[in-house]
Image (cartoon, helix red, strand yellow):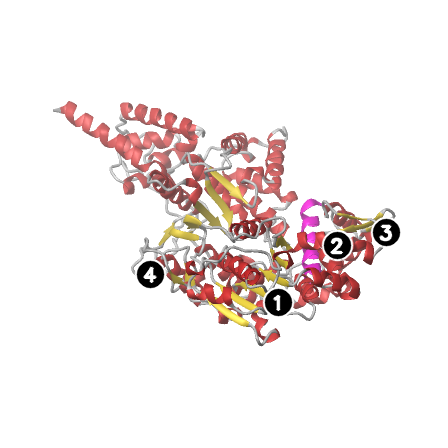
Amino acid sequence: MMDAVPALDLAALDPEQAAAVRAPRGPVCVLAGAGTGKTRTITHRIAHLVSAGHVKADQVLAVTFTARAAGELRGRLRDLGLGGEANQVQARTFHAAALRQLKYFWPQVVGDVPWRLIDSKFPIVAQAANRAGLSSATDSVRDLLSEIEWAKASLIAPEDYPAAAAARHREPPYDAQRVAEVYAAYESLKTTPDGLLLDFDDLLLHTAAALEDYPAVAEEFRGRYRSFVVDEYQDVTPLQQRVLGAWLGERDDLTVVGDANQTIYSFTGATPSYLLDFSRRFPEATVVRLERDYRSTPQVVSLANRVIGAARGRIAGTRLQLIGQRPDGPEPIFAEHPDVPAEAAAVASEIRRLVDGGTPASEIAVLYRINAQSESYEQSLTEAGLPYQVRGGEGFFQRAEVRQAVSLLRQAASREDLPEQSTSGESLVTLVRAVLAPVGLTTTEPTGAQARERWESLVALVRLTEELLGQDESLDILGLLRELAARAEARHPPTVQGVTLASLHAAKGLEWDAVFLVGLADGTLPINHVMADDGSVADFAALEEERRLLYVGVTRAREYLRLSWALARTEGARRTRRRSRFLNGVVPDESPASRIAAPVVEAKGIRPTCRICAKPLIGTYATMLGRCRRCPAELDAVLLETLKEWRSEKAEALRVREFVVFTDTTLTAIAEQLPSDDGALQAIPGIGAKKIVQYGADVLAIVASRRRSTSQNRR
């Protein structure tokens, strides 16, 4: 007798969802676009199979890729009456399901040989690297570990790794043959006198082998589970597909759900080929396309369709044309900025506007391609007094490589043999580069994911130094360390109810009311290493995956979406960057950002002149004031004191040093020149676009108030 399940209300489903739910027992493929209700569909399908008598609830095994997603499945199934002890659908991750099964079947397959699940593969890989004569430094080991995990997920043995890595365009951290030696040593080290050590991939390998090689085990398992559901099927690896095949045997009671155009984890071994080939393997399969998007406004959906509409290749042939089901919302905003600090300041300003207008900070996200990009946005949100949380990674100043770099800078500052001129001004950047070179700051981007991420963080520190020097040309290494310490100390936001900062990879499966996609420049998205030195495409498949990353980012937004890029990395630098090629043909012609700005051509040999005597200015102080030291100028002393009081209050509110807001020289220039608009304010050296966004309105209001007061006194 089948378990009693409450009657399903299929009236709440749209026609395509209902078709997937009612599909006959057997192979079903649900191609589900972003926001189309795939979880609702598959849970209702499970309930339908149970209520129709096709299978008992505890004979269903549903698998997905994260514990969070598995927990959501279980919660939805409980709501449908499938959560009781005697009425329990198994919803687990692949690894959790395999662990449970292996514990049960191990005595039948291996006997009394003890085994233990490895808590961390790191020390074993480090030992294997030492055996092979390679570095056991943290980043090196992590890169080697990533290659081993990719190989095992792809069912590639150590001896086959070099050929497979070349065929798949991998960029191993060392010569492929050396990586293969580490891989082989790692596998050998897991056999110990005390028994076997198993990693998570071994759980899947041993589970598949037990079902493939032991008929009694397979018969018992297949009598226990009769129906299978796989979520996010575009992300399965060859190893996971092997386990799924072993679970099924000759049966075909399988429902898969996925969207090939959301494939963004190929670097881990995931492949959409099993989703794309589903109808070939099961010619009688029911295929249903879910294209009604209930998450995003029609405006966001339209942009998502345009982004993915330019895709090429086999995956693109399966793209879904999403149809927005929500009421109209605002058009997505495109914004071009002169530099990254200005972009970050503008984003923080807009987030402040949204929060003040009633949007919860927890419903806002800033998404970027690489983790090192978070630093600018952590700083801008801190200065704006907005709480935030970094998802899928540590905050910039908590990263191991950044802490190590700051420690090395402190050591350099304490050295007595360093000449004073090498620790301040322009020489400071040279010093910082030299200090960071031994820990991974190379002149070219390294290979290997971990080494590359470390390098990006170190480069971000150098750029931050350059930015701080732009604000205070007399900055020395002690001032730099004070500023870094102040920034690190100020960044302790609450972990709840804050703006989310996340990489595009970490944002998969999540959604927010408002999303800011930032740093959309060629070299960042698409990432630099998929391009050749001449700007051509080096890896077409990797380039298309970068496009899918942008598509995933766009589809995270429910209502508000802002896409931005910067033409320079640091304030005042040459504007040589270009917006992402993925935005070509996507940015509307009427958008202010529809025209790519021309590069700024820096004039050589031309010095700024004094605004009083018109002679060339010599020295930083004169350049900042816009006049020769000896030329007389009318200084409004009252205004200067008012500006200093404002600066002190602002710095205290933002928990930053006063010179970070404005230096004394900059305030003096303001008090002399009395700027009346943004253009006049930005003409003062030391005041870039970022400062205009952050402080321009306040400063101009103070100057205007002083002008009115002076005018009234004269009357």
Mark with earlier residue (3, 4): 3
Category of crowding for the residue at label 1, using alpha-carbon neighbours closer than 10 angstroms: few (below 14), some (14–19), many (at least 20): some
Find disc 1 in the rendering and name its residue. 253
Residue at the right extreme, as displayed: 193
User: Is the magenta region chiefly helix, strand or loop?
Assistant: helix
Select label 3 or label 4 by which is in front: 3
- In 3D space, how far apart are the residues under numbered discs 3 and 4 (Cα atoms)? 67 Å
Residue type for callout 2: Leu
Against 358, residue 154 (above or below) is below
How far apart are the alpha carbons under marks 2 and 1?
A: 22 Å
Q: Is residue 388 visible?
A: yes
List x then y, in percent, for residue 684: 33, 38
Where is residue 692 shown, x and y percent of the image?
A: 34, 40
Pointer 1 with pointer 3, Cβ within 8 A:
no
At numbered mark 3, what does the secondary structure look like: helix, strand or loop?
A: loop
Q: Residue furthest front?
A: 1
